[in-house]
Image (cartoon, rainbow, N blue to C red):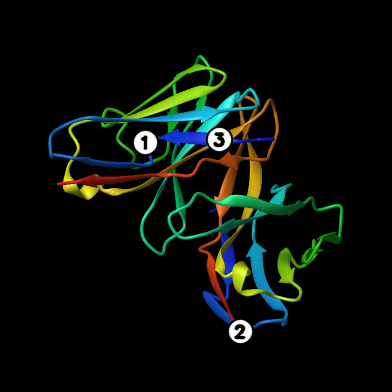
Amino acid sequence: QQQVKQSPQSLIVQKGGISIINCAYENTAFDYFPWYQQFPGKGPALLIAIRPDVSEKKEGRFTISFNKSAKQFSLHIMDSQPGDSATYFCAASLYSGAGSYQLTFGKGTKLSVIP
Amino acid sequence: GAVVSQHPSWVICKSGTSVKIECRSLDFQATTMFWYRQFPKQSLMLMATSNEGSKATYEQGVEKDKFLINHASLTLSTLTVTSAHPEDSSFYICSASAVVRETQYFGPGTRLLVL
């Protein structure tokens, strides 16, 4: 079964610290791995994404590390700020036919950044 | 770029009535649109995938006669919840992707409350 396992379920980090969220997958056919940020009552917003031929991608304070052999990837938020407090979802994409790709989501991590 | 809107953002209806939710891609042509359902503190559950001009593909367990999906143009998809009941109360989110692209852009969501 196609699954993406995400941990931890919740995370509390002090302002200025590093937030790390981990995801693992089983299906090696997944070929695109985005991270989404969701604030309460809002839709998810694309944060950063990576393909399996790249081991790391950085955009500002957000970095994805990807370990293809271990089938794991993680999101690192450097210099975490209270405004980063949100729920983060990792996802994995698979071609589902008819020109479309489907996302399989992790269960989410609620991040709280305290002053 | 890549903005997706949803209307309405909030709807309250009586049990037995039907509710229509619109999803629009504002600045790109969405060949594929997705409809998700999200319960409080849970991940996104894919309900159906629709390609422009084709019938929607529903996920297992989703009643196609209850959740009617129409994707009549490259910028508009609608979800109609027919004969809504209190158990249909949820947060409904659409997403859209362009031609053969993995990235999904999400709308802001629609909160449905059925009394």
Q: Is residue A82 above or below residue A51?
A: below
Residue B2 x %, y %: 66, 35
Circle on res. A115: 2
The vertical placement of B100 against A19, above or below, is above
Amino acid type of the residue tagged 2 in the rendering: Pro
Mark whose residue sits in front, 1 or 2: 2
Mark 1 vs mark 2, CA separation in Å: 36 Å
Q: How packed is label 1: few (under 14 Cα within 10 Å), some, or many (20 or more)?
A: some
Residue under pointer 1: B8
* Label 1: which secondary element: loop
Locate the C terminus of chain A and report the quarter of the image it occupies: bottom right
Amino acid type, callout 3: Val
Asked if badge 3 and badge 1 are on a common chain, one would say yes
Residue B4, label in figure: 3
Residues at discs 1 and 2 both on one chain = no
Identify the chain of the residue marked 2, using the numbered disc in the image: A
In front here: A5 or B90?
B90
Total number of numbered labels?
3
Q: Residue at x 64, y 27 (%)?
A: B27
